[in-house]
């Protein structure tokens, strides 16, 4: 192979790359917070025994989980202006990521809620908890503690999947890479560097989520979060 | 100029592109299955270094975006002086991607076979290969079915990312049709519907296998 690798060129473009990293972090954090909140809400609706809400949430979760993230982004970014809703590429990415992550977190948190035994709720009633107290202390928090590692794996996968947003011209890390590549023609070098940055981001995010787990749920959950690999949700 | 509208022949084009999505999925699962199988074996091997190498491979593949695997194989193969069609780059990267995840899924399945099965087969003087062939793998295979089928859904969906390097599968075909018709909402909804038609039965199959496995182990 007569190719000479030149990584030095990339240093000239560090501002573009840093801006891309920053955008990826912002999009990921925002979508994790919004998606997780929506997931808690939808999983709570889903756990009601009857009602149209349950059917709607099920339909939403199945539709999102059985279509590609890229196509969801296309619908938000290219399709919605036809309905009179025009959004910027960054907003479209955030909407797409939130919609996607909400469906997965709903499914994960629902499994957590279902694993809460009925006797726990009865014990809460016996202690004179109000309905809201039971919901918060007996159902939601223990449910999330149980599924926290799986939830975090999904968050990491979402951060990695945000690279796809470059296809709708969101200027995050993968788009920065494409820009630098088009300027420097050092394709392989730039993508090696950016791949390593993504790896570092994934490991950092996992570490941060483990620390949050330690703070919220204690040492056992934090440890499981730190060692868990992104598991495949089926 | 008269714009084309999204009609029957355009939908037919999408359906024919769906074929390429399926082809790519089969390549990814076939290739990734073979590579992933050996990595899963290495991951559960008795050699410490083999385990570490396999675990590192899995960590790296699961810690980087599919898009980056795609770009690296796309540009890497051309750097190596190979002039290859996009299908090869797409197939290679989807293989690498699938191998990292399948290896981890199957590692879990191999390790969930009860330890007594290892001990029993060892006391029958089986070699390591015989233990795998006749005792461990047949049981692990049964455990692995639901999650493997579930992962196939992820592969079908992630083949859409190969559209970014210009491989014409369903998502790319949707973009092409959209460029000709300017009816993005309709076109991409049709694309999503086609993905759903493939993925939903697979998801349900995975769920059914899961229930069946669960029912058996609790008998």
Image (cartoon, rainbow, N blue to C red):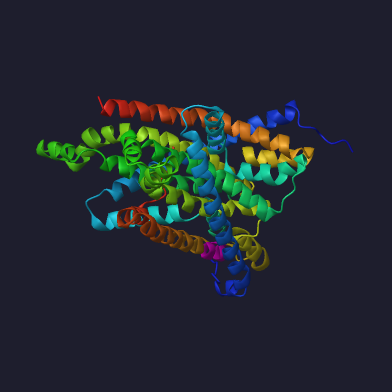
The residue nearer to you, when weighing A80 against B152, is A80
Q: Give residue B128's position: percent from left, percent from top.
A: 19, 42
Q: Quadrant of the C terminus of chain B?
A: top left
Left/right placement of residue B139 relative to residue A43 reads: left
Residue A169 visible? no
Residue A73 found in image quarter: top right
Residue A59 found in image quarter: top right
Residue A219 vs B181, above or below: the answer is below
Residue A80 visible? yes
Q: Give residue B193's position: percent from left, percent from top.
A: 62, 31
Q: Give residue A106's position: percent from left, percent from top.
A: 49, 41
Q: Residue at x 20, y 37 (%)?
A: B130
Q: Give residue A85's position: percent from left, percent from top.
A: 74, 45
| Furthest-front residue in this view | A128
Left/right placement of residue B26 relative to residue A13 reads: left
Q: Main secondary structure of the magenta part?
A: helix
Q: Is residue A193 magenta?
A: yes
Residue A176 found in image quarter: bottom right
Q: How many labels were placed on the picture?
A: 0
Left/right placement of residue A29 relative to residue A83 reads: left
The residue nearer to you, when weighing A131 against A59, is A131
Range drawn in magenta: A188-194
Q: Residue at x 58, y 74 (%)?
A: A11
Q: Residue at x 69, y 32 (%)?
A: B13
Q: Is residue A197 magenta?
A: no
Q: Quadrant of the N terminus of chain B?
A: top right
């Amino acid at each position: 192979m007569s190719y000479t690798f030149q990584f030095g060129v990339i240093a000239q473009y560090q501002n573009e790359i840093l801006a891309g990293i920053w955008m990826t972090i912002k999009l990921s954090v925002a979508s994790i917070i919004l998606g997780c909140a929506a997931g808690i809400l939808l999983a709570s609706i889903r756990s009601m025994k009857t009602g149209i809400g349950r059917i709607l949430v099920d339909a939403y979760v199945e539709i999102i989980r059985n279509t590609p993230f890229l196509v969801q982004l296309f619908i938000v970014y290219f399709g919605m202006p036809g309905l009179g809703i025009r959004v910027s590429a960054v907003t479209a990415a955030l909407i797409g990521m939130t919609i996607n992550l909400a469906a997965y977190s709903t499914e994960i948190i629902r499994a957590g809620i279902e694993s809460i035994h009925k006797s726990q709720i009865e014990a809460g009633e016996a202690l004179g908890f109000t309905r809201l107290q039971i919901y918060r202390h007996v159902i939601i928090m223990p449910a999330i503690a149980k599924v926290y590692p799986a939830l975090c794996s999904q968050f990491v996968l979402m951060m990695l999947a945000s690279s796809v947003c470059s296809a709708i011209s969101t200027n995050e890390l993968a788009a920065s890479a494409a820009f630098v590549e088009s300027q420097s023609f050092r394709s392989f070098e730039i993508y090696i560097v950016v791949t390593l940055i993504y790896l570092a981001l994934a490991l950092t995010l996992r570490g941060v989520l483990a620390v949050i787990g330690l703070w919220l749920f204690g040492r056992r959950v934090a440890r499981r979060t730190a060692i868990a690999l992104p598991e495949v949700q089926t | 100029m008269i714009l084309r509208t999204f009609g029957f022949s355009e939908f037919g084009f999408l359906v024919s592109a769906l074929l390429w999505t399926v082809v790519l999925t089969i390549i990814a699962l076939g290739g990734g299955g073979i590579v992933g199988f050996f990595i899963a074996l290495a991951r559960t091997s008795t050699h410490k270094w083999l385990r570490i190498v396999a675990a590192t491979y899995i960590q790296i593949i699961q810690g980087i975006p599919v898009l980056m695997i795609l770009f690296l194989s796309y540009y890497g193969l051309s750097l190596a002086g190979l002039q290859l069609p996009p299908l090869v780059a797409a197939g290679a990267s989807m293989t690498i991607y699938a191998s990292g995840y399948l290896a981890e899924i199957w590692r879990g399945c191999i390790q969930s076979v009860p330890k007594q099965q290892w001990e029993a087969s060892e006391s029958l003087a089986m070699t390591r290969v015989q233990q795998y062939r006749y005792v461990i793998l047949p049981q692990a295979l049964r455990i692995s079915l639901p999650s493997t089928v579930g992962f196939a859904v992820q592969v079908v969906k992630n083949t859409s990312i190969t559209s970014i390097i210009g491989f014409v599968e369903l998502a790319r075909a949707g973009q092409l049709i959209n460029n000709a018709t300017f009816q993005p909402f309709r076109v991409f909804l049709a694309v999503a519907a086609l993905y759903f038609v493939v993925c939903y039965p697979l998801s349900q199959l995975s769920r059914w296998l899961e229930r069946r496995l669960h029912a058996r182990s609790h008998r």
